[in-house]
Amino acid sequence: MNFRSHLDEVLSSSKFAVTAEIGPPKGSDPNIITKKAEMLKGYADAFNITDNQTAVVRMSSIAGCCILLKMNMEPIMQMTCRDRNRIALQSDVLGASALGIKNLLCLTGDHQSFGNHPSAKGVFDIDSMQLIQIVKNMRDKGIFQNGDNILARRPDVFIGAAANPFADPFELRIDRLRKKIKAGVDFIQTQSVYNLDKFNKWMDEVKSNGLDKKVHILAGVTPLKSLKMAERMKFYVPGVDVPDTIYDRMKNANDPKKEGYEIALEIVRELKNINGIHGVHITALFWEDIIPSLVEETGIRTMH
Amino acid sequence: MIITKQKKFKDLLNSVGKGPVFILGCNECATLCHTGGEEEVLAMKDAFEKKQVRVSGWVILEPACHLNNDKRLLRSFKEELSKSKKILVLACGNGVQTITEIFDDKDIISGTDTLFLGEIKRVNEFDKRCNMCGECLLDLFGGLCPISRCPKSMLNGPCGGAKGGKCEINPDMDCVWDQIYNRLKQSGKLHLLEEIQKPKDWSKSLEMRREI
Ligand code: SF4
Ligand code: SF4
């Protein structure tokens, strides 16, 4: 069988996948990515390179992905609709595919008001749902959004998207996932999980609707590095649900960093036992060096 | 209604210099927004005079964006207008430009910032309601506009940041997608949201002129 990417192969053969996020630098130094990548090599099947995450200007995702490719590591290129219209996005899909990037993650994107250029004009010509559909049609039908034919090679990419089980209204979360599947998504990376009860509730709905059979779901994990980070996640980052129990543990811990790691371990161990979960997606913000031990201690890479 | 807000007095003072200045208001939107009705125009006149800026006259247009009405009304202020090199317009950006069209030898000063097309919720409270996208999609969303009321203009919302009915951008603002959901649920039309809304044809919003 032909797989679109290594990630596709891992997921399609029902192995437990691990993806990890690498944030590009606020500068043009490729070594920042190279260093993080060297540290993480072998600890994940594919690596997300963020696209100006939280609307802060950083090295472009496509460039970060190329640096990984040179190191024989598999990137997942994140694409948001905030900064580019359908012309630029489709052009980047072609460009990414030409360069050998095989996984794309389609996102609407954080609003520019959260970032460091709040006076920028947000584009939002299309949303993530429409981006998924456009990429799918480019790949499977060989057409652009306007219906014109792609003339020289279709972009054969594995299509990802995000899902947030913790946002409101809860009932719509399943509908939206179903809609993303209908739009053509192959894999889903969820918002970081701290509230396992709510996550399980969402997964139950996912399973009873048979959606876990139609899309590969990777559960998000973000280790809490400090009490300050726990506070930020709990109170300020939109869409994240840090329950009081976890927050209190961080608050009462003598060594919050260690406690944060313990919590992450527990969460990963729980997640890997949930039926219908096909992998985890680890985002360790400014703490990428924790990923190797988190992966080793939980044994998720040996589940192949 | 076109919602406006008055520019800072100190900036306006800077723009009019020593005067003399002629002040124009508008009897429609700017009156209801309290940015350019009679009351505000007279207050502006007073404030200028206190700063020793001469005001040669004033009038409330009916409304400022009506070219022929403006021309007719302004005819009776020929003398006052001839004394002023500067005209301060307390109306929306459209009203200001209609005045620009009438005078080619004067400095036209915009006294307001035009914010959005919205409704008057209560006295002095205004909410954005429409981006004038050129092809109204309200029927698809239970009569609530995600283009103007969702900061990301999502046609397949809500985004992952919606929480407790509030928007992730600003917790004082309702998430319109939450409202769309509730309204469609109430009317048994949730199936409308199953459809993937196609990318919007923004070219419809590029009309520059319409003649009947
Ligand atoms: S759909 Fe377009 S025309 Fe209709 S209310 Fe929204 S922005 Fe205005
Ligand atoms: S919270 Fe609701 S209104 Fe705000 S950006 Fe998200 S979908 Fe749009």
Image: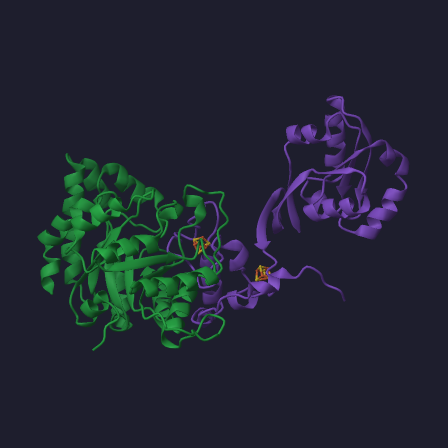
Chain colours: A green, B purple
Q: How many marks?
A: 0
Indicate the position of residue B30 as horizontal and vertical percent values. Answer: 70, 44
A54 or B140, which is in the foreground?
Answer: A54
Tell me which residue sits at (12%, 49%) in the image.
A293
Residue drawn at the location 29% of the way across and 56% of the way down: A66
State the image quarter where residue B206 is shown: bottom right
* Image coords of residue A224 (percent x, y): 22, 44
| Residue at point 47%, 57% (across, down) | A124
Any part of residue A264 in sight? no
Q: Who is closer to the viewer here, A168 or B95?
A: B95
Quarter assignment of residue B21? top right
Q: Specify whether B23 is left or right of A12.
A: right
Say which of A293 and B180 sits in front: A293
Residue B201, image x, y percentages:
55, 66
Can see residue B133?
Answer: yes
Tell me residue B39's x, y (percent).
Answer: 74, 36
Task: Tell whether B82 sits left or right of A157.
Answer: right
Q: In terms of image quarters, where does ligand 2 lie? A: bottom left
